[in-house]
Structure formats: C-alpha cells, structure tokens
Amino acid sequence: MKFELYADVALKCDVPEHRLRRGDIVKLVDRHMAPDGTEGYSIEVFNALGDTIAVTSVPVSAIEVLRQDEVLCARTL
C-alpha cells in the first residue's frame, strides 16, 4: 500500500531501539525501496510538544492508516 508523504500513521509493531510502541503516531517523511525490493518509509516521531525525538526507517508492513474510531493518548518514554 502506498501512503502519502507527510501523512500521520500508526505503528503496527514496536520499534524497541527507539522506545516506540505499537499504536504510536509517526509522520512519513520519505519513501524508499530496500535492496530486496520491499517498500519502506522513513518516519519522524514527535513528543507531545512537537519536538523530534526519533527518525528511523520501517517497512511498509510496520505502519497503518489512522482510523476514525481511534483516540490519541499520551504516554511517557
């Protein structure tokens, strides 16, 4: 599935090296292909005040669109 760049999406899995959890909201900042041909995205993660706290890459299988029936919440890193 292709996502719009700069869209907000949710993680479908944990990214422990950045202390990110399934359900965290991230922003897509670049699209790229891995050497094996799988699609991936560079993501930027912000804290509640809008400061960047992480930039990393994930496969397209690790993200999903936000849904109307979801509610945002805050958690401590």
Image (cartoon, rainbow, N blue to C red):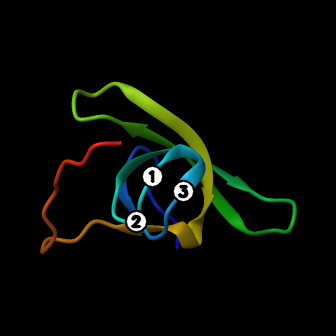
Farthest right residue?
35
Pointer 3 and pointer 2: residues touching (CB < 8 Å)? Answer: no
Q: Is residue 5 left or right of residue 33?
A: left
Mark closest to the chain's N terminus, 3 or 1: 3
Q: Looking at the rendering, which quadrant does residue 16 occupy?
A: bottom right
Give the Cα separation between the discs numbered 3 and 1: 5 Å
Q: Amino acid at mark 3?
A: Val
Q: Amino acid at mark 1?
A: Leu
Front-most of residues 52 and 68: 52
For the question of whether residue 30 can be seen, the reply is no
The secondary structure type at the circle numbered 1 is: loop
Q: Which residue is mark 3?
A: 15
Relative to 37, is 5 above or below?
Answer: above
Mark closest to the chain's N terminus, 3 or 2: 3
The residue shown at (69%, 52%) is: 32
Q: Position of residue 47 (x, y in %)?
A: 30, 34
Q: Amino acid at mark 2?
A: Arg
Front-most of residues 33 and 62: 62
Pointer 3 and pointer 1: residues touching (CB < 8 Å)? Answer: yes
Q: Which residue is mark 2?
A: 22
Q: Which residue is mark 1?
A: 20
